[in-house]
């Protein structure tokens, strides 16, 4: 199997894992404070990442890689989890999942800026069209629906796209799972300190679904998913494999409806399908 095909397979597995992130976060923030949830998931994943690095005796990153690891850490370890956790206090996971349709565009833009990729002009046409549909969906809900939640989701998409592209660029030399592990370890001391500072006075009232949500976002969303995702982006190309994120709204909406019994309106489905069709058309022009 060639490198590109392997990249698509790894990327697809990563997307499937990430699809459960927003529903799991939605469940967890019902009983956990968003800030505590963000730092706790990073601390748990960071501790596991440190164990992996020690067990496999991985070499330390070069001094020139530290700045990139900081960007990855701020983007996907802190920024995206915190912003989405805050957003999910204002919007449902089904509503927020539609914004994931913007991630391919954000990832591709930063892939050009940081990864040196040069997609064809037609790629940008389809990507921008898909993004316009997502923006139109948010506006159709009315500015009074939850401008705070939508703004937080847009900010989350931007920092996540940067973290994805930077991590993929670094994965070409450092390795996919090594990048996310070092990014988690880099932030571990701060995350542990903040976890204890924001820890609730008691966990007696925390029910099983919230614990399961915390467990999922800590182990799968924060660590396992990135092992496959960064490897896929590095092997198949940031802009090209990044288009697989268009499948994430489908998986996420299905989980939101099945597990959380949240309403999935026909408009949400229509926008999700339209975004996937529009931006998927850009895939062939990614290189």
Image: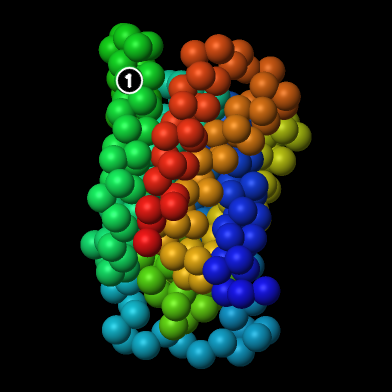
Q: What residue lies at 61% left-to-right and 53% top-to-bottom? A: 12
Q: What residue lies at 40% left-to-right and 74% top-to-bottom? A: 170
Q: Identify the image's colour scheme: rainbow, by chain, secondary structure or one colour.
A: rainbow
In the image, is residue 229 above or below residue 124?
Answer: below
In the image, is residue 147 above or below residue 207?
Answer: above
Q: Position of residue 52 (x, y in %)?
A: 64, 76
Closest to the observer, 269 or 55: 269
Q: What residue lies at 51% left-to-right and 90% top-to-bottom? A: 59
Q: Position of residue 200 (x, y in %)?
A: 55, 39
In the image, is residue 122 above or below residue 171?
Answer: above
Closest to the observer, 287 or 46: 287
Number of labels in the image equals: 1
Quarter of the rendering containing residue 177: bottom right
Closest to the observer, 208 or 200: 208
**In the structure shown, which secondary structural element does the residue marked by tag 1 occupy?**
helix
Residue 216 in sight: yes
Residue at the disc numbered 1: 136
The image quadrant where one finds the C terminus is bottom left
The image quadrant where one finds the N terminus is bottom right
Quarter of the rendering containing residue 148: top left
In the image, is residue 50 above or below residue 64?
Answer: above
24 sits left or right of 124 in the view = right
Residue 188 in sight: no
Q: What residue lies at 48% left-to-right and 33% top-to-bottom? A: 277
Residue found farthest to the right: 208
Q: Position of residue 226 (x, y in %)?
A: 55, 60
Q: Position of residue 147 (x, y in %)?
A: 30, 20
Closest to the observer, 50 or 168: 168
């Amino acid at each position: 199997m060639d490198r590109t095909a392997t990249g698509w397979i790894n990327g697809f597995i990563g997307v499937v894992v990430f699809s459960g992130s927003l529903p799991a976060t939605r469940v967890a923030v019902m009983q956990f404070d968003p800030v505590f949830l963000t730092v706790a998931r990073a601390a748990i994943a960071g501790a596991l990442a440190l164990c992996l690095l020690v067990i496999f005796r991985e070499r330390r990153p070069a001094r020139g890689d530290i700045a990139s690891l900081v960007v990855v850490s701020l983007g996907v370890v802190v920024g995206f989890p915190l912003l989405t956790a805050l957003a999910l206090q204002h919007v449902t996971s089904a509503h927020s999942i539609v914004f994931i349709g913007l991630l391919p565009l954000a990832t591709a833009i930063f892939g050009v800026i940081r990864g040196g990729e040069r997609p064809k002009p037609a790629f940008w046409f389809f990507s921008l069209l898909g993004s316009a549909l997502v923006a139109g969906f948010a506006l159709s809900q009315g500015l009074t629906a939850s401008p705070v939640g939508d703004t937080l989701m847009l900010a989350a998409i931007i920092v996540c796209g940067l973290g994805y592209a930077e991590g993929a660029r670094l994965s070409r030399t450092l390795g996919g799972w090594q990048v996310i592990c070092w990014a988690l370890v880099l932030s571990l001391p701060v995350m542990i300190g903040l976890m204890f500072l924001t820890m609730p006075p008691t966990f007696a009232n925390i029910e099983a679904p919230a614990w399961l949500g915390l467990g999922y976002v800590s182990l799968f969303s924060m660590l396992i998913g990135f092992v496959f995702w960064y490897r896929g982006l590095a092997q198949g190309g940031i802009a090209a494999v990044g288009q697989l994120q268009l499948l994430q709204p489908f998986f996420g909406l299905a989980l939101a409806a099945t597990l959380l019994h949240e309403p999935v309106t026909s408009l949400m489905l229509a926008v999700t399908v339209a975004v996937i069709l529009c931006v998927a058309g850009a895939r062939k022009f990614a290189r």
